[in-house]
Each structure stands twice: as structure tokens, then as C-alpha cells.
Amino acid sequence: MLKDPISSATSVAITVAILVVSCMLHEIAHGFVAYLLGDDTAKRAHRLTLNPLAHIDPFGSVILPCLMSLAHGPIFGFAKPVPYNPRRLKGGRLSEVLVALAGPLSNVLQACVALGIVRVLFATNGFKSMPFQQDITTTIFVYKILMQYMVVNISLAAFNLIPLPPLDGSSLLGLFLSGKLRQTYEYIQHYSLPILMMVLYVLPSILHFDIISWYVTTVIHFAMEFMLQGL
């Protein structure tokens, strides 16, 4: 039986690194789509950069994914939200929807790119023909990184579509509210982090059921099963 070349500590480090890159591209996607639709707020704030330091949220990008990884649960997190001005967007509410969806869709695209690399390597016997094939653990290492990249990005897409602030799903939900209901919802968003912590940690302890982990795990299961068909 082959020994797993990735230790627990290395696995956590790789997962956090993947998540930082994925979250960075997620936020850049928001800002870039907003820029294409007429709002250059993100560009002026220097948030369209590939420098991860401009996007990392200490809790959402590092601490939370570390805790999730150590708990052997689904991996998710978030980066600092990219600023944008909806009043400067061309196209009204539809443009706001596109900006909100850009982040999760970027994660789906990243997962598809990783899948494409895996499929090409299998189709061309790339794993077998790699110069380091004599060290089988390295081949397994590369394969596991690609798989983890897919899992992390599927997790991020699913997690960010949850209608809880500060996630993208809350922005989408807010677009369909009006009047006092929208004002109340926007007020609640000022307490986004405590609300998110309550849903992630307090409610599961009270209910003895972690609905967020169940939802994300279910999405990962069906998505990976669909994407890996034929391999």
C-alpha cells in the first residue's frame, strides 16, 4: 500500500494556499466584471491586482479554512470584499446580479480548469510519462493537489451562494428586496461576521446538526461525481 505523500500539516498548508489563490481570483472577478460594466471603483482601490496581500482576510482566508481543514470538514472561506459602486454600473439591477455572480462563477471556472488538466493528463498518459514517474509519490502529490483545487473551488462557489452576509448570496438576495425590507437587510449586514459565526459554530452546537457543512458537502459530492465521470 502506497504511503500518502501529503502529511496533515502539509495538506492544511496546501489547502490554505489554494484557498488564498481561489479567493483572490474570486474577488478580482467581482471587480473586473464591475469594471467592464462601467464602475472602476475596484481598479482605483488597487483591488484588481494579483497580489494576494491586497485580498487576504485574516479570518476568512486563513483562520477559518485552517479550522475547517483540521476538523476534516468541507473547506470554505472568503477574502476581503472588493468595493464597487452599483450607481456607476450600466444596466441597473441586472449588472448588480452579474457582479455578484462573477465570484462564484470564477470558482466554477477554476474547478473546471483543474478538471481539464486532470483529464488531459489521463488522456495523454501524462501522469505515467512525467519525468518523475519513478517517484510515484510525486505523481500522487500532483494528482491530489489538482483534486483539492477542484474541491476547494466547488466549496467556495457553494458557500458564497448562501444568502448570509458577507457572502455573495446575500448580495443577490438583497437585490430582490425593496423598501423597508431592504433597509432592514442592509442594516443587518453591519453585523455580518457575528451572524456568520453564529451560523457556522453556535447553531450546529444547539441543533446538533451542521446544515452549512451538510449543504456544502452535498454539493461537493454531486459536483465531483458529475465532473469525474469517465475517469
Image (cartoon, helix red, strand yellow):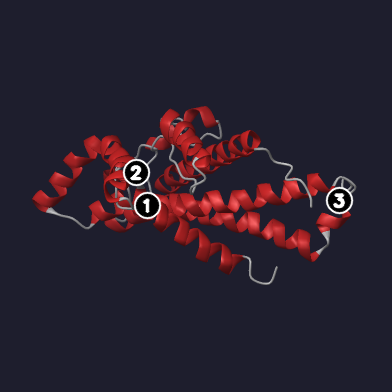
| Residue that label 2 marks | 200
Residue 22, compared with residue 219, is above or below; it is above
The residue at 57%/69% (across/down) is: 226
Disc 3 residue type?
Met
Q: Which mark is first along the chain, 3 or 1? A: 3
State how far apart marks 2 and 3 are (Cα): 42 Å
Frontmost residue, 35 versus 117: 117
Estimate the x, y position of residue 90 in percent, counting from the top left. Answer: 33, 52
- Residue at the farthest left position: 180
| Mark 3 closeness class: few <14, some 14–19, many ≥20 residues within 10 Å | few
Q: Amino acid at mark 1?
A: Ile
Compute the Cα span from label 2 to label 1: 7 Å
The residue tagged 3 is 130
Marking on residue 198: none
Q: Mark 2 or 1 closer to N-term? A: 2
User: Which of the 4 image quarters holds residue 129?
Assistant: bottom right
Image quadrant where residue 8 sits = top right
Say if mark 2 contacts mark 1, CB within 8 Å: yes
Q: Nearer the viewer, residue 168 or 209?
A: 209
The disc, 2 or 3, on the residue closer to the chain's N-terminal end is: 3
Name the residue located 48 percent from the left edge and 49 percent from the top edge.
74
Q: Residue furthest bottom?
A: 230
Between label 1 and label 3, give the one nearer the viewer.
1
Marks 1,3: beta carbons within 8 A? no
What secondary structure is found at the residue carrying circle 1? Answer: helix
Q: Is residue 226 left or right of residue 58?
A: right
Q: Which residue is labeled 1 in the image?
A: 212
- Report the residue at 54% width, 43% height from top: 22
